[in-house]
Image (cartoon, grey):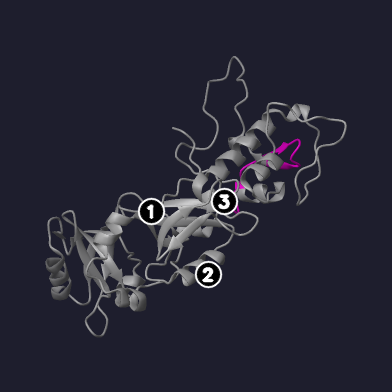
Amino acid sequence: MATLYPSLEDMKGHQILQAQAAAGVRTPPTTVVAEKPKLSSDAAPPGLYPNLAELEDYMGLALSSQEIQKNLLPEGSAAVGVPVPGLGCSIPRGLLPPSPPAPSQALTPLGPPPGQLVAPLSGNNAGLRRAEIKPGVREIHLCKDERGKTGLQLKNVDQGIFVQLVKANSPAALVGLRFGDQILQIDGRSCAGWSSDKAQRALKKANPEKIVMVVRDRPFQRTVTVHKDSTGHVGVVVKKGKIVSLAKDSSAAHNGLLTHHYICEVNGQNVIGMKDKQLMEVLAGAGNVVTLTIIPTVIYEHMVKRLSPGVVKSSMDHSIPDL
């Protein structure tokens, strides 16, 4: 299985680390600095391998060996690092190219476990984890508030029932339900084929102290991790919550963001119903690594059909999810 990366920048950074590790015997060690790595004057860089400075020039990133080393391992990891000549830092043995085995050794695969994200630039980013769309299904227990409300509004889409609105500070918000989640069961009854009205009636009649739901995370949505350039931008133009344009050669363009999609979340925080100015403020405060959750326009507009824009703006839960 191929190695997975949160972003194109992470993939490029990892490839550079692997290339420099493989070529390390020909490259003298240097001091770790917060600037572009500098090679000593008496040694030329290996001609076939890129370096961090080239990645910075290519993608407009501000990189340092210290920052990449910090992101290679989560805190508290006991993995053994290997010094990398030319970078002045170590990287985990699992990220290095495999060495030729001795004749008596069995051939065992090296490198990160299949399917595991490798993120030398994004690191253990909290926004990336908050935005994660998990596979599979989960069971949640929901109750009603003192007014008998769950704070949840449901919508039929293609014979399935989906979360259309989660009200701020409601029981639905407290259990972590999000816009676009699919409700598979309510109190043991399958929701397949239900109308929106039937789903709302089921919630209304349910036991106020315990409603058992089976939920699938946001099947119509996907996440894209991008990196801000030296000016603090990711290269996306948004109008009324919809992506209308991408800057050429930006991180947004490199990483596969598409126009005609709405932004649902920024680093896991719901931004539906926000004015563009508010959305830009959230983006500005999101850090250098930003994970956007997006949904195709045609699906989004169907999901919010007949939902008052005023209700969305005033009631939608915009809290930052817990990890």
Of badges 2 and 3, the one in the foreground is 2
Tag 3 residue: 122
Q: Quadrant of residue 284?
A: bottom right
- The mark nearer the N terminus, 1 or 3, is 3
Q: Main secondary structure of the magenta part?
A: loop
Q: Is residue 83 magenta?
A: yes
- The mark nearer the N terminus, 1 or 2, is 1
Q: Is residue 79 magenta?
A: yes
Residue 55 image offset from top left, x and y in percent = 65, 41
Residue sitting farthest toward the top? 103
Q: Is residue 36 positioned above or below 109 on the image?
A: below
204 left or right of 178?
left
- The mark nearer the N terminus, 2 or 3, is 3
Residue 251 image offset from top left, x and y in percent = 54, 49
Question: Do the residues under discs 2 and 3 have CB atoms within 8 angstroms?
Answer: no
Tag 2 residue: 281
Seen at 77% across and 30% down, the residue is 45
Residue 53 image offset from top left, x and y in percent = 71, 42
Seen at 48% across and 42% down, the residue is 116
Tag 1 residue: 133
Residue sitting farthest toward the right? 42
Mark yes or no: residue 6 visible: no
Q: Is residue 206 positioned above or below 85 on the image?
A: below
At mark 3, the secondary structure is loop
Q: Which mark is residue 79?
A: none
Q: Please tell me which residue lies in front, 25 or 297.
A: 297
Tell me the CA gap for discs 2 and 3: 21 Å
Mark yes or no: residue 226 visible: yes
Tag 3: amino acid: Ser
Q: Is residue 62 positioned above or below 178 on the image?
A: above
* Residue range highlighted in magenta: 72-90
